[in-house]
Amino acid sequence: MWSSKSALNRAQRQAAITSLESDEFDILVIGGGVTGAGIALDAATRGLKVALIESQDYAAGTSSRSSKLIHGGLRYLEQYDFKLVREALHERELMVTTQAPHLVKPLSFLYPLHNKVRERTYVGAGIFLYDILRGLQRALPNHKHLSHKRVQEAAPCLNPKIVLGGIEYFDAQVDDARHTMMILRTAALYGAVLTTQTRAESLIRDGEKVVGVEVTDLSSGKRLKVKAKSTIMAAGVWSNELHQHFGITANYSVRMSKGVHIVVPRSAIDSSVGMILKTAVSVLFVIPWTADKWLIGTTDTDYTGDKVNPLADAADVDYILEQVNKVLVKPLTRSDLLGAYAGLRPLVSSEGASSTTKISREHIVDHPVPGFVSIAGGKYTTYRVMAKDAVDAAASDMGRAIPESVTRGTPILGADGYHALVNSADRLARDLGISQSEVIRLLDRYGSEIFEFGEIIAKNRELAQPLGHGCDYLGVEIYYAASHEGAMSVSDVLLRRTRAFFETGDYGLAVVNKVAEIISPLLGWSAADAQASIREYEALVQLEREAIIP
């Protein structure tokens, strides 16, 4: 029942376009990143009639290009941003325990120490405060101090002459694009109308009040007039441009900061834990990603370039390698590189700010005219609080009292029954005809939605097989991306529904034809349509490759 109501696909999209044309909404959300997704869920679970439009793909921007961490922001303690850290830690505990235990997983990190006494005292006090700020909820273990010997046992990769001890603490990890997708599908379950490839063109006004948005369906070129009591814009790095385009004078502006991550094999760094390294301007994370890969990043530099396709360049890669190699016995080289990606942080900015690293990650909600709210800033971890604040701000536009937010206690799709299914992995493996380890991997990506896979595989046993060529995703996951998760192109599948783009070493190029073959019938593609989507993806890969060549 849940999957049929929450499925995002070709037929659902057409029904959504019809609804945008004919219905009046309480709230129209502009932007399909995690904040927009959270707003759609918050509004829908308050009983409001809500629609969301996204000009590209869900999570196409920042929400698929983060560090994949759910964390309080340890480094923000040095900026005395205690409110943000406390808020983020509370949200982290909720996600790990009740909201999304299938998607958000505890992860241990080692903070290497270079001084036996002074640094251990200073850093230890900060991490102690980090533990205290989460309050009474304690889903993750407390930190612990490690001796020089214990650090070498946990992370033999670290240079014992430089790293003299360490502190182990815990945060959590998530596949950001998958998490955003599951929030959106949860919103759809509760009645939200969702569309991609729908671009906001102009605001519809009745005097000063905004009463809707003119929207273009980019797949057909059709212009729609969408009526809504309140429009909430969660456009991230596009905020300044859209405010200007809509003729709205906002009470804030957004600066863009580029963050780059590289991907290397697990064999390149001998460690059983993740690591956080202090740099001159920020921090660098060495993050376990899948059983055989590390993510390493991030950079934090001002950015003024292309918002649609920000690229990691040679300087970004060299900076990351230089920083991580300061503590490694065996330095990483470019030959270790499997992939890289760049994302843009939307930072709320004021006049006189001189560096993106000094701007707070706290969010701002603006209600400059009746019927229009915008939100920007914040951290991925605090998306739910941001969404609640945005809907609260729009409440005055409703003309009636609305219920309080209930998302604190609302599980994300796939969470219900997750732990019981993990305990039944051996039975599920027999039913699906795949390995038990594969079942666990699927449960950690889809949760209880795994039952849908059984129905799909029963009709085509070939879909139970991996794509091959170094890409371990099953055919059924590719099928499901188009049948239930709104994928409309090869790029959608390989960049966001899966992460083959930065995981495979060849950007997934070896499997593009297979991907197109699987999704073509679901999308109603001709052979020419499939080839066009493949060429679009190949062109994007070429841009990425050229950008990181020194």
Image: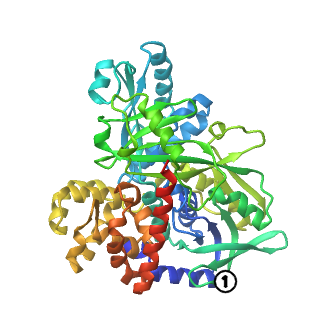
Relative horizontal placement of residue 532, taking residue 245 as reference (left or right): left
Q: Nearer the viewer, residue 13 or 310?
A: 310
Q: Left or right: 51 with respect to 549?
A: right
- Camera-nearest residue between 319 and 498: 319
Provide residue 390's location: percent of width, then percent of height. Answer: 65, 57
Q: In this figure, which residue is indicated by the disc labeled 1?
A: 223
User: Is 216 rendered above or below residue 79?
Assistant: below
Q: Is residue 418 visible?
A: yes
> In the rendered image, which quarter is residue 374 located in?
bottom right
Identify which residue is drawn at 48% across, 72% down: 536
Residue type of the residue flagged with mark 1: Arg
The residue carrying pointer 1 sits among few (fewer than 14), some (14 to 19) or many (20 or more) residues within 10 Å by Cα, namely: some
Q: Secondary structure at mark 1?
A: strand
As drawn, 406 above or below 128: below
Front residue of 414 and 459? 459
- Would you say 456 lies left or right of 5 here? left
Residue at (57, 57) in percent of width and height:
35
Left or right of 329? Residue 296 is: right
